[in-house]
Each structure stands twice: as structure tokens, then as C-alpha cells.
Amino acid sequence: MLSLAPRLAGARVKRVEDPRFLRGGGAYLDDLRIPGLLHAAFARSAHGHAELRHVEVGLARAAPGVVAVLTGPDLAEWVSPLAPRLEGPGFWPTRCPALAEDRLRFVGEPLAAVCAERASQAVDAAELVAVDCQPLSAVANVVSALAPGAPLLHEAAPGNVLFHRDHRHGDVEGAFARAHLVVGEAFTHARSSASPLEPRGLIASWEGERLTVWTGTQAPHIYRAGLARAFGVRDDQVRVIVPDTGGGFGQRMHVLSEDLAVAGLAWVTGRPVKWVETRRENLGCASHAREARVDIEAAADARGALLALRARVVSDNGAYHVYPLTAALEPLGMAGIIPGPYRTPAYEWDAVGVATNKPPLGAYRGVGMTMGAFVMERTLDLLAERLHVDPAEIRRRNLIPREAYPFLSAAGFVYDSGDFPKALEMALELADYEGLKRERERARGRGRLLGVGISCYTEYTGMGSATYRSRGMSDVPGHEAARVSIQLDGAVHCRLSMPSQGQGHATTTAQIVADELGVPLESVVVSQPDTDQTPAGSGTFASRGAVSQRGAAGAAAATLRRRVLDGAGALLEASPADLELRDGRVTVRGVPDRGVGMAEVAAAAGEGMLEVTEAFDPPGPTFSGAVHVASVEVDPETGRVALHRYVVVEDCGPVINPVIVEGQIHGAVAQGIGEALGERLVYDEWGQLLTGSLMDYPLPTAADVPSFILGHLETPSPLTPGGHKGMGEGGTIGAPAAIANAVADAVKLLGVKVISLPISSESLIAGVDR
Ligand code: MCN
Ligand code: SMO
């Protein structure tokens, strides 16, 4: 008989980490107290593009409290630059030094690092650094970077092209030739920033030839390898300890110059050095996101069924490949996902990553897919409009039916599972789509601008080593691991190779482990990674958490369960097959009095004997997805967009924790709202940032976020243990597309095109007669 204990996985369990966080008990990087700590600050480039002749640090060195000042040439001899790699053709590498050496390539690029006894002294001294440089013409956007004769950012990247690939599937030309209708448009996306609540930072400390770094990285082992390579030491000479972390959203996946420079300061001073960036540095100098243009053409038959797609994707990558993801990240991601959850027989794309004098483009929640969904969903609405078909109907005519899975997409992905026709109907019903349309018509009659928008997207999640190998990403291993142990007091410890930045991994992992071991949730403690104690893995990105938790921690706990039963069997003189494990006790089935506790089993086994490590290589990608329906109202006076109703029907396979999944959707949609309606980093032609603070870069606030109506559909993945699929990025992927479609619907009669993210209020009322 199976155990009748209620399962924790799938239940609405409250997050175990929250009581501590809510009481202020979190320990983030800046809370750590380490004796003898020095503080770092950076002097940064004021130029978008310049030849760097000399950095004068005499005054800074003599300033009060200063212990060391480093420049590019000081570090060049013993710290290798970051050199992200991508195997295969169409890749032109860049070398990004810890501190600029002879060229400045973006405003904010670090050129000297100062450390002092107090943080304020370091900041003051950094201002005394003087720079002798010759400004060069900047290429601040893709058009000027690709112009003939444009100044080159890197010798190794002719024409300022960092990445270029193309792909063709099916008879694209034939499809366009026989199409009933072709629609085309050029869509753009502005530069944005992941903007985690806690800015980036690290503490670095050397003991002999061993480096310890405390940092809220999303990818501790990748970070460790990056630092080890830069300093020419073995991976095991670097220890990375991840404290509590206040959001990453992709930005903490990278190793950036400052990471190397701070470790360099720690080496020369022989003391631990801390650096926590300012809000301004986070916005202006850390990795950015998104900036791209996509030219798309879609061919359809008379009913609006898609025959073929053609896309040219260009991403404005900024000055360097970001480590370890490279400039392939956005263009490859965008191009691949454009066909979305639709049957598109033929597709050809061409994708380019271009070097410009701006900070490097990096990961941000929804990488590539947000723009991909925006482009595809707007294109479908254009098609619907031309054919006078309802946007819901055009989707019905194109969505991949459930029975067609596994489905080979025209971009070459195997979509493993999904039921979009059902998700669409659920979402329309939850939104009362017909009611919204009637309301829209009534409001239009009174001069109000209401609109309804739909977006459907599918999302690659839970990738493993096969995906990263096939993409040529040699610095992203792709596997994960977990170590689960039973302590002498019966408590269960779990060390997962991936950290949490707020996704609630300590809860969802504990749910899985507690179920497997038959112990209460409270007795499972899941810790943030410490590379000295945590088995090696890749990290938290690309929505791989749920899949890996089940795969690694679930497997380790299952093996441990067998060992516990064996151990208890010996103590109870019973066959393990006759035992059951529940509430932290092993009892002989049917004889509840004959039992032993976990602690006794652990004591009998001996210290450390009940410890299991399992590695897991996700077999994915597994494709999850959602349907979003948004209704909006545009103020004809101000162009302000208000969100009225917001519906998401999400399918990430079996949900481990609905509270967490819903929270992920809320947060991700909030970020998508910011992306759709406000966030825009503006640069002038010299590469100067004009929107350098959160006064000019409007992150969404609670006032911008409506309440949500959520529905879940669970189409399990046939690939992953438990059928789980990832979803942490999904809200951000679906929201801009749905909002853009709703806004376009609202302003349709004004003749305004909605082709750029974010959608500016000015653009909406440009044509309004007042
Ligand atoms: N989950 C679940 N059942 C499922 C799928 C997921 O209960 N079927 C749970 C997971 O157990 C996990 C959470 O939902 O607790 C998100 O899972 P998943 O989609 O696997 O994503 P990851 O855990 O890999 O998290 C990464 C993802 C990414 S790539 C970005 S970017 C992002 C995001 O998560 N950054 C975040 N959500 C974030 N949330 C917070 N608070 N902070 C960030 O930096
Ligand atoms: S942008 Mo998420 O870290 O893949």
C-alpha cells in the first residue's frame, strides 16, 4: 500500500523563507561583517569612445584612507581579460579587461579601482582620478555601427559585428509566392535594465593563493570558473559563497569587469575588499537588456493560416560580449522563438549582434523571448486586422493542437508539450472576452479609448548540457546537482547547486525532499550555495529551477530514502519493503509501535553516512507557455495607458507550489508592464546616457499593476521528472505583447501604429486632434 501522507508538492505551502525576510533577518552582501574589510569604488569612463592614454592616480593614492589604487595596465600583467566564447561560425570575440587599458568603449566603463578604509573615502578618492584620453567618434546605435567606414570597436570584429547566424526551414520563397496575403513590419525594442532591488556587489578575500568571494551570483560555479580563469588559478582555488540575494533577473548571471577588479584589489592589499554598486551604477554601467530591431514578414492563406515567416533580427549589443553568454544571447533567442506556439510550416531568419558604444547587453527575464513574442503577436494582430478576423479567431486558426505534440517548430525546436487551444479558451472565458469587446464598443461610442489584447507564447525552459553544447556555449555546463543529508538530530539538509534570488527555492526544494523522505517540511533546510560544500552545477537562469529541483534534489532524496529504510530495517529487524516512512519516523507497516526516528537511524549509520549527492542534466528544453489577455484604456488627453483587466492562463506542467508560481507570475507581469509602458534607457549619439536615474527610468510601481485573474493548465512534459516545466520568466514574456495588442486595439481608429517597446504616451496621442 502506498503512503497516505498528504503530498507537499502541489500544495499551497507558505514560503518557509518569508518569516525571516519579513522580520529583517535576511543577510545580504552588504550585511556581512568581515574583519579588516576595505571598501572599493570605481573611476569610470566619461566618454562613449576614446583612446585612453594615461590614467593619473597620484592624487587618489594620497587621499585619506586610501590603501590601493589600480588601473588597467596594473592589472593587465596578471589578470586575464574576460573573453566569452561561442563555438561555431559567426562569432567574433571581444576581450574585456578588468579595467580599461588603452581604449574606452562605453560611458561608465571602469578605468581605475580604488580601495580605502571607509566606503566614503573610496568614493571621494575615485573622483580624484584624472584621465588623459583622445575622444573618438562613437557608434551609439546599430545604424551608425553598421555604416560603411564606421569606427571599429574591436579589431577582431570587422564591421562591428559580434555575432551572425542564419537559418532556413521549409520552402519560404514558395510560400510567399503563393500567399493570399503578406504582412510586414519593423518592430523595435528600447534598451532596458533588469534593475534588481539589491544592486550588484561582492566581497573578495585571498588567503595565500586561495580566493573567497561572497556575491549574490545566479551561477556560482560559472562565476568561480570565470574568476579562476582570469587569475590563472584552478577552479578549486576559488570559493564562491552566495548570501541572501535581492533579485537577479538575469543580471547576476554575468561576470563583469568589477568582479575581477575587486578581486585584484583584495590581492594587492592582502585584505578583504567589498564593493556594492550604487543605484546609478546599476542602471548605467552594469549589463543592459533587450535593445533590438526585428523586421518581419508573414505570409498567410485566405483564412489567415500562416504559411511562412521571414525575420531579420538585429540586436544592439553594446561594447562587449557578456561573460559567459555572449552577444548571441538576444538575437539567437529572439529568432528561435518567433514562430511561438503556432504551426508555421516555413521560416527563415537572419540574426546579428552588433557592437556599439554602450554597456554590454546581458540576460534579463524573458531573454529574447519577450521581443520574439511581441513581434509575433503584433504580426498576428496585423494579419487579423487585414483579414477582418477577430484576434482570438486568428490564433485559433494557427495554434498547434495538443495532439500535434511533440512538434518540430520551423526554428528547429522540438516542442515537447502544450495545449494552447485550451489555454486560449480558458483565458478568453476568464477575461469575459466577449463582454470586454461589448464594453469597448460602448466606450468608443462615448469617445473613450478601450482596447483588448491577447498574447500566446511558448517558452524554452529547463535546458541541460545538450542545449548549451549545441549552441556552442562552452562556458555554460548545463547540469545541476543536489546533496541531501540527514543530520544526527534527524534534520535534513539540502544543498542545491543553484541559488535563489527570491524564487522561493528553499520552499519548493523542501517540498520535494520532504515528500520523498516522509519528513515534515520544517525539518528540511535548504541552503544557498557555497562552492566548497555544494556540488557543482550551473545556476539559476533560463527557468531551470523546478526541473532541476525535482531532478537533482528529488533523486538524491529518493536514494537517501532507500538508505534510511535499509538502515531502519537493520535496527527493526524487518525487511525494508515492510517499512513506511512518515512524519520523520520509520515504522513497520501495520505495527505503528515498532518504529525508529530519523535521528536514531542517522546515529546508527554514523556521522555523514546518510548523505547522497546526485547530479542531474535536464533533458530539455521543455516548453511551457501561457495565454495573456489584457484590457486597457488610453487617455486621449495624456496618452496614459491604464490596465483594467489582466488574465494569465499558465501551463508549466504540474505545479510544485501554486503560491510561488502565482507570485512569480505577478512579479514577472509587473516587470513586463514596466517594459511595455515605461522603461527606456536613452543614449545620445556620443553614447551618453540621458536617463541615468530612476527619476528618468520609470520602473513600474504598485500603482501601475492591476490585480490579476490567473488560471492554471497542467500539461506535463514527457521529458522531465515529474513533468515539471519552468515558468519564472513567463509573465515578462507575455505581458508586453498582450499590452501592446490591447493598446493598438484602443488607438486603432486614430491610425497610430504600435511597433515599439516601450509604448510612449506621446506616440499614442501624436495624431489626436485637440
Ligand atoms: N515552480 C513550481 N512549479 C513549476 C514551475 C516552477 O512550483 N511547475 C516554482 C519553482 O520551484 C521555483 C519558481 O517556481 O521556486 C520558479 O521556477 P522556474 O520557472 O524553474 O525558474 P527558476 O527557479 O530557474 O528561476 C529563474 C527565473 C529566471 S530565469 C529569472 S530571470 C527570474 C525568475 O526566475 N529572476 C527572479 N524569477 C525571479 N523571481 C525573483 N523573486 N527574483 C529573481 O531574480
Ligand atoms: S534572464 Mo533569467 O536569469 O534566464
Image (tube, rainbow, N blue to C red):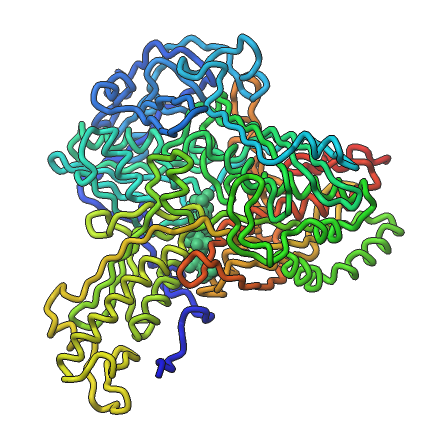
**Which percent across, then down, holds residue 93?**
39, 22
Relative vertical location of residue 608 with respect to residue 362 in this rendering, above or below: below
Relative vertical location of residue 260 with respect to residue 624 in this rendering, above or below: above
Relative vertical location of residue 246 with respect to residue 563 in this rendering, above or below: above
Most foreground residue, 242 or 408: 408
Most foreground residue, 701 or 710: 710
Query: Furthest residue to the right?
Result: 445
Does any portion of residue 697 appear in the rendered image?
yes
The structure residue drawn at horizontal position 25% and vertical position 71%, both measured from the top left corner, is 561
Q: Quadrant of the C terminus?
A: top right
**Which percent across, then down, holds residue 538?**
33, 45
**Which percent across, then down, holds residue 356?**
50, 21
Left or right: where 118 falls relative to 718: left
**Which percent across, then down, holds residue 45?**
41, 20
Does any portion of residue 636 appear in the rendered image?
no
In the picture, residue 439 is in which quadrant? Answer: bottom right
Left or right: where 640 falls relative to 159: right
The structure residue drawn at horizontal position 51% and vertical position 53%, both measured from the top left corner, is 416
Left or right: where 570 falls relative to 33: left
In the picture, residue 757 is in which quadrant? Answer: top right
User: Which quarter is ligand 2 in?
Assistant: top left
Q: Quadrant of the N terminus?
A: bottom left
Q: How many marks?
A: 0
Relative vertical location of residue 44 with respect to residue 653 in this rendering, above or below: above
